[in-house]
Image (cartoon, rainbow, N blue to C red):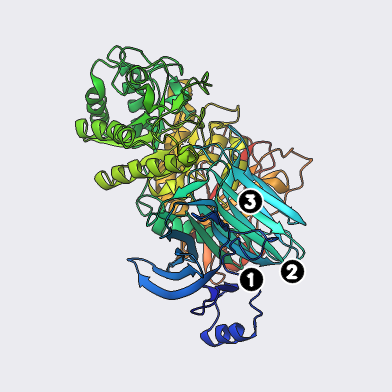
Amino acid sequence: NTSLLLDAPVGGEVRFIYYGDKLSTSDAATLLETEQKTFSAYPVYGLNCPSESALSVTHGDGNMTLQLEVIKVDTRKEQTADITTIRLKDKVYPFYMNLCYRTYPDADIIETWTEITHEEKKAITLNRFASAYLPIRKGDVWVSHLYGSWANEAQLAQEPLRPGIKMIKNKDGIRNSHTAHAEVMISLDGKPKENTGSVIGAALCYSGNYKLFFDTDDSDYHHFFAGINEENSAYTLKAKESFRTPELALTYSKDGLSGSSRNFHAWARKHKIANGATARKILLNSWEGVYFDINQEGMDQMMSDIQSMGGELFVMDDGWFGDKYPRNKDNSSLGDWMVDARKLPRGIEGLIADANKHGIKFGIWIEPEMVNPKSELYEKHPDWVIHYPNREPYYYRNQMALDLCNPQVQDFVFGVVDKLLSENPDLAYFKWDCNSMLTNPYSFYLKENQSHLFIEYVRGLYKVLERIQEKYPDVPMMLCSGGGGRCDYEALKYFTEFWASDNTDPVKRIFMQWGYSYFFPAKSISAHVTSMGDQSIKFRTDVAMMDKLGFDINMDKLTEAERQFCREAVQNYKRLAPIIQEGDQFRLVSPYSGNHAAVMYVTPGQDKAVLFAYDIYAQKYVERSYPIRLQGLDPQRSYRVVEINKMDSVPARPFVEDGKTFSGEYLMKIGLQAFSDFRESSRVIEITAQ
Ligand code: GLA
């Protein structure tokens, strides 16, 4: 439903013309004639010094200028997409760049990136190498983006673009989404609205340091650039070597922020996240229930608990490994991926046997990129660890990163997963954690090329993940990094879901899950019921059900009534999963706009829907309730609305529309009085076409 129009005459420059609603061929031709073609589709440093550039290089002879002209344009078909490549060459130097665009006929997403190579005598240096540039016409343009910190991920910021530079960046080295996200929404016609207005969405598919910025200069445009953060990362490229920048995924919708989000969600499920089309299992993870206190009986008990809830998978978290150094705290053993036989005498085999006994699957936590100095691995291979040869190291969470630039280290990290899976083929799930940023930046392997460290680390990581995916394509993996520290669309190629935050307080989670949903589909957002927060089990479960439901809790601490509620909720979730995980999401009431939040999902056939309504800080008598107007239904059809996940002990205003039937038009024009107006209460409503 969208068009991106460029002018790329052979022998000339490549110019940006248009991005937005789909144009007919004749309208595109007219626009091509009338448009002034002011902006390069990819500005390079050289002839136009004052403007920001996407690419800047130092040639082998020291010259720092570029002037690229089109040599050829071609389009080739991939299995599910088409790639159009604009091949460019410098007018003077044997320097080549491909500007690439991948379009998916079944998803409103265009990915763009560059490929750089040269045949100069000496190596060249890449100083700046953005993936993409997009001019955005001025007006009342706003940007929505996510910011935060550990335990406070994915908070939403919305601000108008003003003169000067608005930059969103990361320099953590490994974890790249705790403090800011490499995805943005750009609302073109005024303050961002969820369901109306023109919105461009952009997601940089990259797991390392990034930089997205808008330069608002004296022209009629905002200039948007996105790519790898080049700070401390000047890249030396020898002749015939090629450098590929990460993809920037672009989308456009006139149905507001929610419309652009739905485009991302559909593309993610169809093309981007690992096994995007498969169903996800309801799991219990051991972390918040027992922390490091792992033992065979305790794990067996937790497996029995999740089985009795109707769940399908148990994941043993941190604390199961270490021989010379047992892992009882976070200060040792990372790197020593052998079972601690003192805690688990029957080993992983025994745990899998227990899982089989309970009729569920078994998965395991690993953090294979990291090492504690107190480990056998560090004692054996200190040169595999990123740290200074000649300075006191700094430890974050008592650990350091392994040097994934080094192919031997890549083999080791791949080997962690490979060994576990070849010894235990029934192992059904991995939670892959990464609890530190890149500290003490020095690679023994890279020697004099230290400025390649941040980039080569990420490439090394992808090589490992690629090998795992190739050998074990069906094993689901959760992407975790001290909560939501690593969440981007390139990493998600290898992961089925991500851990959204170590903060599982449901009120915090409403805000986070709202924020993540701007870019990521529900089935990728792991949301677990835990003991954090003192709200009712209903409120905690209703929040977790908005995304991919799981548990991280010691079920012993639940009352029988709470257990019964959870059992019913699991059954409800199993029935609703196709709607929540595969349906279209509509964000209806923002938690940022008041005391409530509401989100709904609708199947593509518009026959089933589910509404989640949350009262956050609402106070009885003080709060004036209002109906929630639904979206995405067929106005002509009738729908029956039924409240589910009910719990008598939780106070709520009665749901007056319960069990009644309404036209889609009524539900979208008038709405449902689903807010219950009690502090931290919630409602889940199942909507079925009659
Ligand atoms: C990180 C994760 C947690 C848990 C711990 C284990 O903080 O986010 O879920 O796995 O590590 O150390």
Viewer-side residue, 223 vs 649: 223
Sort mark 3 into few (<14), some (14-19) or many (20+) by Cα contacts within 10 Å: few
Task: Specify few, some or many for label 1: CA neighbours under 10 Å numbering under 14, 14-19, or 20 or more.
Answer: some
One can see residue 361 in this view: no
Vertical relation: 143 (above or below) 344 = below
Cα–Cα gap, marks 3 and 1: 57 Å
| Residue 540 left/right relative to 573 | right
Please say whether residue 185 is visible from this viewpoint: yes
Identify which residue is drawn at 68% across, 38% down.
678
Q: Which mark is residue 656?
A: 3
Q: Which residue is mark 1?
A: 39
Q: Residue at x 29, y 44 (%)?
A: 467
The residue identified by callout 2 is 220
| Image location (x, y in percent) of residue 572 | 44, 45
Q: Earlier in the sequence, mark 2 or mark 3?
A: 2
Q: Earlier in the sequence, mark 3 or mark 1?
A: 1
CA–CA distance in space, label 1 to label 2: 11 Å
Residue 150 position, x and y percent, is 58, 32
